[in-house]
Image (tube, rainbow, N blue to C red):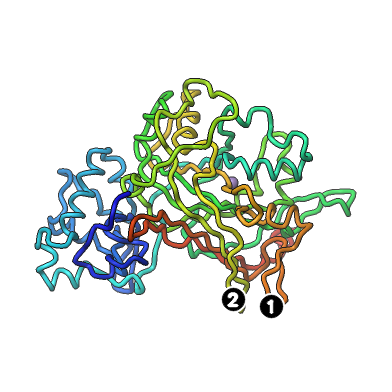
Amino acid sequence: MSKLIRSWVESANSHETPFPLNNLPYGVFSTKDLDARCGVAIGDLILDVSTLEAKGLIKATTFPLCQEARWNSLMEAGSQVWSKFRMRLVELLIEGGETSLSANRHLREQVLIDADKARLHLPLKVAEYTDFYSGKHHATNVGTLLRGPENPLPPNWLHLPIGYNGRSSSVVVSGTDVQRPWGQLKSPEFDTPIFTPSRRFDIELEMGAIVGTASSGPITVAEADDNIFGYVLLNDWSARDIQAWEYHPLGPFQAKATATSISPWIVTKAALEPFRTSTPEREKDLLPHLVEPKPLLYNVALEVELKPEGSVATTLSATNMDQLYFSSAQQLAHHTTSGCPMSVGDLLGTGTISGPTKNERGSLLELSWGGKEPIDLGNGISRTFVEDGDTLTLRGNALGEGYRIGFGDCAGKVVAAASDPYKRKS
Ligand code: MN
């Protein structure tokens, strides 16, 4: 296991910081004085790399990489440039390293911004968004709820990573409020469908892989891993009642189109390298093109917290990315088998990550067992699904020796549904 790499930015050397020099995640931030721009989190600070690049202190290519408020240009530059860029950041920030930044007080004050004073934006332009369903405990729980315990997994499930094409337009950054959606649903009390705000609005604890290298035909699992730039936390907000009615036979549609929240920092594959781990043992042999050539998952501890308005936060669930049955690389490889072109900035949700026990479940649907077992939050508060005013927060940490690689919170507050969106139109 690798150790903390010390920085001259003192707050980056704390055991507690999510952003030591080992991490160097990529985000987009603004302050009251600065327009949105590229930043790298280091301890309690954000390094304004757009300004550093404009001053000639970062030159990984002959063309600019950080002059737009998104990281797509760096991704497009290719994996050798990803390494070169990261090495340059390390040179500038490592304890006892090059002094062009550390020794220049004026420059330091200009380009190191208090994270408290920054507002965070989407770190990339999301090209397209696909969501998978590769959490075996999640799929088993949901299958049991929907179809009973006899055959909870669909027959294809152990052979390929099931997914659906989502909407990149629905992806929002952590901190964005999420409005309870309206939709058509059919509940057992009614003979005919009704149009109403969702009554079973839910979260899904997921991670998202970001494709950094485009492809135009089938690629191997190893190539897919090379093409992934980094990872974020992802909450796939889901209206279970709308989903239950609409999903036959083409899968999720409006139930998943309201919002998908992602954490604000892209944690690179380079930062996660020491935490690689294998997917669980196969229950059925995979076809050769989906077999993992090496460990392609990561040991990332995950948790879900719920905070009702005006009350204290409760941890609902804690699990790990290593519970996924298929890795993001396997998902990406499968995505290309038909010849489907993949673009820089594509976002691939892993699917809800649940562990084997009750307190490791990554959705309220599972935690409340279909709404039948309310979750006690203390103080006389309980939940089956998300209520208006609740803030849901996902957290992720890879734990090293004396340091951790954090993702930054993926949070969203649910606000009440709008008044009937069709009333004024009729
Ligand atoms: Mn999902």
Of helix, strand and loop, which one carries label 1?
loop
Q: Give the residue type at disc 2.
A: Val
Q: Residue at x 25, y 54 (%)?
A: 67
Q: Which mark is residue 379?
A: 1
Task: Give the image location of residue 57, x and y in percent.
Answer: 13, 56
Q: Amino acid at mark 1?
A: Asn
- The location of residue 343, given as percent across then percent down, is 40, 36
**Circle 1/circle 2 CB separation < 8 Å:** yes
Q: Could you tell me how far apart the alpha carbons at marks 1 and 2 are, in whole angstroms? A: 9 Å
Which label's residue is closer to the chain start, 1 or 2? 2
Please give the name of the residue rendered at 81% of the width and 53% of the height, measured from the top-left corner: 194
Q: Quadrant of the C terminus?
A: bottom right
Asked whether 56 or 315 is in front, the reply is 315
Disc 2: which residue: 312
Of residues 341 and 41, the one nearer the viewer is 41
In the rendered structure, the answer to whether residue 246 lies left or right of residue 360 reads: right
Q: Is residue 286 left or right of residue 202?
A: left
Query: Would you call the spot at circle 2 few (<14 residues within 10 Å), some (14-19), or many (20 or more)?
Result: few
